[in-house]
Image (cartoon, rainbow, N blue to C red):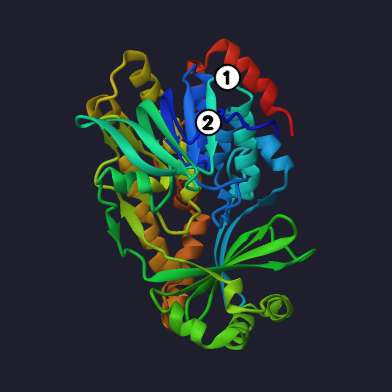
């Protein structure tokens, strides 16, 4: 990777830029790359160093893959290591209740892709570093927002108490996740709702030669387990639990947890017993839905999980975040070029994307009840019959397309890229 473009700084420094993006996740980096290629200067704040973060959401839907391909980074990111997956299956007691086959979709986006986020982020960051106008403030935590009257006009960031940077910008974009500090400092309610009855405990197992090539939901009498291949030669497993019961589960100790998991996944019982050594080998994800009270304000924009948070069902988080970035790009470009970053000028982004996020929330609530809810034998038979009918009908094909691309697909406005930067981007995107 190229060396980071970080300015030489003393204890306090002030930078001036067009857009300040907070958070170097998929949404923040993809948006930064689009803006740089359109001639916009960007300062990117990221609180971690060396991209040392543990990500669990790594499945890319076709809609997200298409955006990354349009940015010229998909293939290079794949070459770092990824696992193609043919679709979703729901199984119970040895029966396949639902089979959503992505191979029915048009090529080349006729599969899911389990792509470790570090591979995606590394490739996006490399593409940004190859372009002028980019400043990356690694290890800087957002401390405050700068305001001129009601208008957000910048951000203050600290690096481990040793350095303070004040970034003056026309727009500050919060892309810092479900617990967004940008959103909190702006005083915008998260809009959290307990829309799901489950939390998820994630863990990984070595599985050389035992991959499934699918995302499988294994239903049990107590709930469900989500299983999919991941790179390199591993399985990532999400164990759904009744909401806020993790402390009771953890109190049983690792022996009790291994026994229950091995009973639910007998094909992987040996890996479970040999690979899970401590309760801390499982990571709990607090599953909730959220829609921020507003996504834009004067000089401020929220994208991805900062604006809307979703559950893991249907692997929609990264997909929506990347589409948010694509929708935000032309709106931000217009704000910078006109010198008008008012809420009214930024509002078209929210008006376009909020309905899509709300539709996914509705879809996920239905999916959670249908796929993860507990049931008796009669309900299981009815569920199997309904799922089989959906799988064979045109409704199943439409459902697959909606899950794959989202209810309102977005494409990258590559026509807004400047010629010189676009040429540099094409050259950079092809390197592994």
Q: Name the residue under label 2.
A: 9
In percent of the image, x 30 and y 58: which residue is there? 192
Other-residue count near label 1 (Cα within 10 Å), few / some / many at <14 / 14–19 / ≥20: some
Q: Residue furthest top?
A: 419
Other-residue count near label 2 (Cα within 10 Å), few / some / many at <14 / 14–19 / ≥20: few
Q: Quadrant of the C terminus?
A: top right
In percent of the image, x 44 and y 51: which residue is there? 395
Q: Which residue lies furthest to the right in this view?
A: 209
In percent of the image, x 43 and y 83: which residue is there? 376
| Chain-order first, disc 1 or disc 2 | 2
Q: Nearer the viewer, residue 331 or 138?
A: 138
Task: Mark yes or no: residue 111 visible.
Answer: no
Position of residue 173 measured from the top left corner of the image (x, y, whole percent): 39, 35
Q: Which residue lies furthest to the front in this view?
A: 11
The answer to which image quadrant residue 225 occupies is bottom right
Residue 296, numbered circle: none
Position of residue 235 measured from the top left corner of the image (x, y, whole percent): 67, 64
Task: Mark yes or no: residue 5 visible.
Answer: yes
Secondary structure beneath dot 1 equals loop
Image side of residue 339 versus residue 278, left or right: left
Distance (Cα) linking label 1 and label 2 = 19 Å
Image side of residue 212 versus residue 297, left or right: right
In percent of the image, x 69 and y 42: which residue is there? 78
Q: Mark 1 points at which residue?
A: 132
**Up-down: is 89 above or below 104?**
below
Position of residue 301 measured from the top left corner of the image (x, y, whole percent): 34, 35
Position of residue 57 measured from the top left corner of the image (x, y, whole percent): 54, 54
* Tally of marks: 2
Q: Do the residues labelled 1 and 2 touch (CB within 8 Å)?
A: no
Secondary structure beneath dot 2 equals loop
Image side of residue 206 versus residue 136, left or right: right
Q: Which numbered mark, 1 or 2, is in the foreground of this view?
A: 2
């Amino acid at each position: 990777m190229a060396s980071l473009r970080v300015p030489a700084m003393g204890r306090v420094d002030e930078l001036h830029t067009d857009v300040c993006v907070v958070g170097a996740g998929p949404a923040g980096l993809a948006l930064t790359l689009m803006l740089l290629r359109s001639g916009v200067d960007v300062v990117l704040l990221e609180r971690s160093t060396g991209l040392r973060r543990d990500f669990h959401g790594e499945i890319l839907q076709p809609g997200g893959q298409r955006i990354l391909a349009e940015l010229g980074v998909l293939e290079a990111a794949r070459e770092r290591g990824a696992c193609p997956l043919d679709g979703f299956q729901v199984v119970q007691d040895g029966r396949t209740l639902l089979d959503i086959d992505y191979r029915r979709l048009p090529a080349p986006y006729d599969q899911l892709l389990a792509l470790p986020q570090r591979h995606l982020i590394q490739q996006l960051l490399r593409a940004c570093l190859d372009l002028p106008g980019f400043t990356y403030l690694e290890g800087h935590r957002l401390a405050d927002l700068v305001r001129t009257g009601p208008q957000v006009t910048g951000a203050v960031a600290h690096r481990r108490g040793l350095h303070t940077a004040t970034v003056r910008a026309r727009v500050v974009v919060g892309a810092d996740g479900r617990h967004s500090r940008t959103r909190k400092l702006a005083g915008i309610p998260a809009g959290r709702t307990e829309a799901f009855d489950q939390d998820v405990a994630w863990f990984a197992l070595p599985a050389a030669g035992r991959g499934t090539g699918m995302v499988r939901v294994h239903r049990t009498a107590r709930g469900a387990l989500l299983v999919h291949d991941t790179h390199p030669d591993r399985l990532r497993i999400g164990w759904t639990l009744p909401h806020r019961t993790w402390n009771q589960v953890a109190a049983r100790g690792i022996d009790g947890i291994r026994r229950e998991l091995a009973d639910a996944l007998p094909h992987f019982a040996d890996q479970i017993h040999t690979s899970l050594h401590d309760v801390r080998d499982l990571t709990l994800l607090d599953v909730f839905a959220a829609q921020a009270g507003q996504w834009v304000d004067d000089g401020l924009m929220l994208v991805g999980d900062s604006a809307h948070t979703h559950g893991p069902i249907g692997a929609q988080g990264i997909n929506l975040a990347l589409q948010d970035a694509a929708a935000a790009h032309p709106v931000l470009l217009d704000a910078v070029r006109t010198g008008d970053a008012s809420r009214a000028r930024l509002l078209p982004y929210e008006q376009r994307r909020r309905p899509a996020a709300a539709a996914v929330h509705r879809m996920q609530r239905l999916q959670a009840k249908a796929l993860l809810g507990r049931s008796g034998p009669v309900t299981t038979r009815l569920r199997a019959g309904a799922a089989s009918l959906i799988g064979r009908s045109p409704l199943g094909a439409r459902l697959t397309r909606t899950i794959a691309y989202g209810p309102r697909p977005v494409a990258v406005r590559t026509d807004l890229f400047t010629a010189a930067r676009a040429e540099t981007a094409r050259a950079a995107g092809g390197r592994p």
